[in-house]
Structures are given as structure tokens and as C-alpha cells.
Image (tube, grey):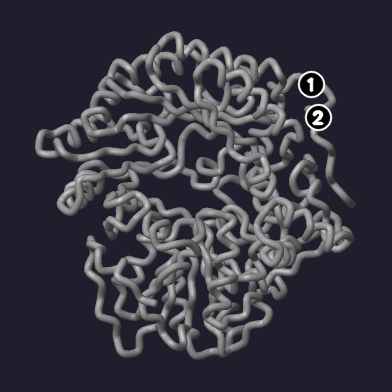
Amino acid sequence: MTSSVFTSERLLFTPANPDTNAIPIIFAFPNEYSVGITSLGYQVVWATLAMRDDVQVSRLFTDTHEQLPRTPEIVGFSISWELDYVNILNLLESLEIPILATSRDDSHPIIFGGGPVLTANPEPFAAFFDVILLGDGENLLGNFIEAYKEVRNASRQTQLKRLAQIPGIYIPSLYEVEYHSIDGAVKSIKPICPEIPAVVQKQTYRGNTLSASTVVTEKAAWENIYMVEVVRSCPEMCRFCLASYLTLPFRTASLEDSLIPAIAKGLEVTNRLGLLGASVTQHPEFETLLDYISQPKYDDVRLSIASVRTNTVTVQLAETLTKRDTRSLTIAVESGSEKIRQIVNKKLHNDEIIQAAVNAKAGGLKSLKLYGMAGIPGEETEDLEQTVAMMRNIKKAAPGLRLTYGCSTFVPKAHTPFQWFGVNRQAEKRLQFLQKQLKPQGIEFRPESYNWSIIQALLSRGDRRVSQLLQLTRDFGDSLGSYKRAFKQLKGQIPDLDYYVHAEWSTEQVLPWSHLQGPLPQSTLLKHLAEAKSYINPSPKELQPVLGTRN
């Protein structure tokens, strides 16, 4: 089923000629080609493998693939969306590989996974992988291949024990999890033998050359786009934010040595440029970068910017974007309430948000998208009313600017100070309240599905017992109803949905990812949590999360 999509690719690297003894690898993205090839992480890992002569890599997507080796030794998956796990299981079956790591033997390839979903909390997916790569792939990938080469002809168990010695490589089967009771909290997570490290440390790449597209194609979801990573992580450290906490420290690409040469190279093959990063405009030399892109020779370039910090939206930025065929800008504001922004550590005031809108309009932009959240710990009705008032004030200050308020439900994420909180049960009602208030004002309201937030919370705080639930859910179909049905079927064998999703966890309990160390120690996260709680006033009963530790 190799297809013509690959023929329209323009490569920005030179693949190596594999040696006769090269390791046959399948590198998969568990979604369609157009989605996978738009993932910068996937592109970069694939190119890194393709430039090595000691491996022969073939790509696999749900709708197409390159010619696959008959007996691959390694099969890898890059995962950037939680619900793609269904496609991982389907692809493994199509390759006739058992979906559970425990069912594989020496005749099967090593199955590895990486990407933001697995780095955050791999435990719900642990049963499906032999190897999980935690953190940045820049050094980790090479270390993985080199270590595998040393034990290439050994037994599977020997291979896994050797790989477990590499910092950032996590082998779930070499750790044993004990629970207080069959449906209770985690009691302990220990390696099964002394030579396996007790804690696996997420890997952080500290260079100042960040990623850039390795392929440009019209078949990508973002047609013909060339992407450049301008910054990695985010210095703001909003307390719920995985993109900041999980990827610290904040790193910026060197303008002269990395960004400008990368952009110049990309714009030779396309006129669409995407600047990526959680907070692109916080690059210390961002204005110089804009000046570079504003040169007359790039007049036909279409520019997209991921998300910008509110107080960096200048008229100059808006003008440059308008000239470069961008009509809209996205800023994250979290809430219109100063109190809520203090709780989450969003250093931002309403007047700065209004000014950003005024500047956007003055620079010629047509629309502004603001992102917020409902159900943030400590939130009360008056905070929602303040969000509505803020949107009204923006509309007044920048008439004619199309306003969109995108709103998700707060979901606790591993390795952040808010990992101990649960999802607010009132969140769905709050989304409805905002919809009712904003629509008549002529402000477009785009809520993210509350049911999807529930599933996200389950996967972001799940432990290994969730793996069996995921297998069942896949058989039932992928709706919230099928998750509830699976919980019913496993009643008494795993905790209920409530425990994973809504319960506030004790800061004393062992977390499902306690053996996986993110950038900050737990003591620092607890300090940040205490600071957030100092802003939360005693609130009505409905806002008090239930205490969900089970001993």
C-alpha cells in the first residue's frame, strides 16, 4: 500500500545509504499521513534515523506506508494525541505483533514509543510498549540505537535490561507496581532487580539549535508549511501547564547560527512559514527575527505564529503578520478574573489584554482568538462573570475585530503543581453559562468538549490498571459511553472513573508516575501548589474537590 503521497515530498536533508547489516526499523505515526507529516517531532525523529547508515527506516501511517521490512527489529511510535492509542493497537495487529508487551517473545520486534503524551505519563499505555523514551529525542534517540546495537543478538530480556541503563529510557516491564488494594491508590513502584534504576530521569536537550522541518509537502494538513521551533518550553510557568513544566528549562534557538539559516533554507522550497513554540514572541531577539522576515525578498511569504504572549502583541507584530497573509492571532488569557490568573500564575492584567486587541486591530488583523479555561481550582461564578465583562470590554475597545473565546475544562496534568487537583464537576455547566452570556454579544464561543476533558483527565492521571480499560474501550468504540461501560465491566478490579478524574489526591500519596522524574522535584511542585492555594478563598461546597486517597 505504498502510495504516491511520498512522491510530492521535498526533503531538506540527505538520507544515508543503509549498510548491508543495517537495523530494519518501522517508525509509525498512529494517524493519517497528512496529520503525521505535519508533526515536527515525527519529522525530526524520522530524518534523524534516515540519516544513519546503521538503520534502515520505513514509515507507517494508518492510511499509507513505505515498503516495510519483513522482519523489523524495532517498531517505534511517535504519539502526540492521547486517543491515538487505538491506532497503535490496530497497527500492531496489522503487523501481527501482540499488543501486550508480556505476550511478545524473542521473535518479535522491540516496540518503543515517545512524544509528549508518553513523556507526561506513560503508565496508562505501559502494557503496550517494551521501551518508552522520556523527554527530548536529540540525544536520547542516538543513545537508544547505540545501546541496542550492543545487545542486538541477545535475548529480549537481556536487551531490555541493557536499554534500561540509558538515562531517559523507561522499560515498564522492569518495574513492579503495588496497590493499597485492588481498586485503591498506588502503594509503591519498584524495579524488579537491583541493577535497574529506581527512578528514570526525563532527558533535556540543552543545545541552542532547535528543530526545523525536514520535509515539506502539499499533502500535509498544513499544506506546504515549513516549521521552525523558535523556543522550547515557556518561562511563564502557569501552574496547570504541561507545555511549560514538563519541558523546562526555557530554551531559545540562536538567531544567527540556527533560526535565520533554517528559515532561509526552508523558504527556498516553500513560501509558507510556521514559527513554533509555546511562547514564540518571548524569544529575546524576536523583533530582529520579524525584521528579517519583513525583507522585501520575502514579500510573498505566508507567516503563521503558534501562540503569542499577550503583552508582546505590538502594532509592528500585527502589521508584519497582516503583510504576511495572517488574519488572526491567538493569545491565552485563561480567565477574565485577576484572582484566577493569580491562582494559576498567569502574570497578566485585563488592560494588557485590551491593549493587545487594540494593537492587533491597528496593525490590520481581522480577528483575535482568546483561550481560556473553566473549572480552574478556586473558580467561582463571579470569576466567570468577570470573563464575560472582559470580553465585552475588548469588543468595545476594538470594534470590528472578530473575537473568538475558545474555552477548555481544566484537566490536571502530571509533573505540574495542579496534578493533585481533580476536574471540577461543575465545569460543563460553566461552559454553558459562558456560551449563554457571550453569544448575544456577538462573540464566538468555542468550548472544548467536556466529555473529552474527562477522558483526557483519566489518561493524564491514569496508572497501569488503565491499560486493560483501554483495551476494552477500543472494542466498545471510542465515546465517553464506552469508557463508562468498560469501568462497569472492571468494577472492583480498578478504581472508578471518579477516583482518576474528579478526586483531589493527597500530596502524601504515591503518584502513578512517582518513579519518573520530570524537570522539577516534587518539593518544588508542592511549593508552587501551596502558593496557588494561598489565593484560593474558602469557596462554596461545590468547589471543594472530594478527597480521594484510598488506603
Tell me which residue sits at (58%, 45%) in the image: 520
Residue 416, horizontal then vertical, whole percent: 62, 42
**Circle 1 residue:** 539
Counting the numbered discs, the total is 2
Q: Is the Cβ of the residue at disc 2 closer than 8 Å to that at disc 1?
A: yes
Residue 319, horizontal then vertical, whole percent: 25, 24
Tell me which residue sits at (46%, 53%) in the image: 204
Three-letter residue code for mark 1:
Ser
- How far apart marks 2 and 1 lie (CA) works out to 7 Å
Q: Mark 2 Cα within 10 Å, few/some/many (few <14, many 20+)?
A: some
Quadrant of residue 22 within the rendered picture: bottom left
Three-letter residue code for mark 2:
Gln
525 up-or-down from 58: above or below: above
Quadrant of residue 57 within the rendered picture: bottom left
Tell me which residue sits at (57%, 20%) in the image: 438
Residue 288, horizontal then vertical, whole percent: 22, 32
Of helix, strand and loop, which one carries label 1?
loop
**Circle 2 residue:** 544
Q: Earlier in the sequence, mark 2 or mark 1?
A: 1
